[in-house]
Amino acid sequence: MPYRFVELLPKEFEKFEQQHALGTYTQSIAQYHVLSARGRHPYLIGVKHDERVVAAALVLTETTRFGSVFLFDRGPLIDFNDRALCHFFVTKSRQFAKQRGALYIEWTPNVTYLVTNNKGDMQQSVNDSFMATMSGLGFQHEPFTFGMSTTGSPSWEYVKDISDLSDEKSILKSYSKNVQYYLKKNKQFGIQLRELSRTDLPSFKALTESTAERLHYHDKDLAFYESIYDIYGDDAIFVFAELNFETYIASERDKVSALEQKLAKINEKISKYPNQDKFKRQYHEFEDQKQHHSQRIQKATKQFSDAGQATVVVAGALFIKQPQEMTYLYSGTYEAYKDYYGPYQIQDMMIRRAVALGIPRYNFYGISGRFDGSDGVLGFKTAFEGHARQLVGRFILPVRPLKYKAYRALKKITGRA
């Protein structure tokens, strides 16, 4: 039986995407419902062979003055090595788009172009064969881009293979020494993690908005986070790292009291054995520790007073769970509480959860693709020891060539090409 191009039922699409190697949250059925709720007019299209789905894509639409754009965000889900299937899918999806007034089709496949280590050194050859495949299908490749964006999928991301991790020891060992240190500090601070309910979302929005204003990027609106919460259900995990000042200060005071008792005993030994330098060294060591904890108490007491409440949010993040990967999507950290290292504890918890669920990949998501120190988030993500991947980028297939040519000419004139 030949291939058949169809609009898929949501259940058909979901089953196929959940099992596909290229599946990701931007090509999920939950994302389809989010886009529908936000008026993006998405489609679920695919190819069947012997009534079995062999290719699929979630397509969202954008509007221009010249016609709509059919966007395949991290799609399609297809075997790119199957040339006959690819040609059939491209031909039919182009016809589908043309019937609905589309100006052009844009693919951003979930395919790696190159892989680098934490310093940006290439770890494998570039994927030129895929570029040739896309050219053979009639697509035009847009120039590679660098930098961060909150309006679309990133062209660079940082990922960690967790398929070989199995227990607490192997997970902790897989991190850099800095992360291991920060996690120890989290325990000392008594940072607590809490998954959010829907009523917490305004507080989550306040956190992300504060971070966006500080770092000068555009944040999502509250309605977006509510849609994610409602539609993704258990597959969307909102997390807060919180600090209780009363508990923390009491713990630090207990440590100061214990050190004072040690200092008193060592003082007695110094008086009894004035020539024993080791007691003097111990005294200075414990005195330094006492001063350190006293400074923590002083700092936390002021923060407690400034906050006007016992428990404060230190950091927070949103994660999307898929069979293929756990994705770290949006987050925020309050600048005043950055020294409590809340984001590290959040990431550790979610990596542990992904390992427990048998998810093979942890996706820290967007990075700028620049390894010169200008990317503020890169250092945080690389501390968890993964690798960077540049995706193959954007591919354009004109649906109405003459109108598309005029559209590009206008964008060039207006400086938006």
Image (spheres, grey):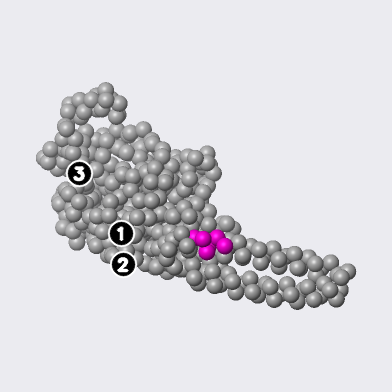
Q: Which secondary structure is most common in the magenta stretch?
A: helix
Q: Secondary structure at mark 1?
A: helix
Residue 287 percent coordinates (x, y): 71, 66
State which quadrant residue 179 falls in: bottom right
Q: Label 3 sits on what residue type?
A: Thr
Q: Earlier in the sequence, mark 3 or mark 1?
A: 3
Cα separation between marks 3 and 1? 29 Å
Label at residue 197:
2
Q: Residue at x 31, y 47 (%)?
A: 74
- Looking at the rendered image, the disc whose residue lies closer to the viewer, 2 or 1, is 1
Q: Quadrant of the C terminus?
A: top left
403 or 335: nearer the eye? 335
Residue 403 percent coordinates (x, y): 17, 28
- Residue 79 visible at all: no
262 or 388: nearer the eye? 262
Q: Identify whether 389 is placed above or below 184.
A: above
Cα separation between marks 2 and 1? 10 Å
Tell whether position 211 is magenta. Answer: no
Q: Which residue is mark 3?
A: 61
Q: Identify whether 76 is placed above or below 315.
A: above
Circles 3 and 1, Cβ within 8 Å, touching? The answer is no
User: Over which residues does the magenta segment extend?
Assistant: 298-303
In the picture provided, is 377 more to the left or to the right than 10? right
Bin the neighbour count of mark 1 within 10 Å (Cα to Cα): few under 14, some 14-19, many 20 and up: some
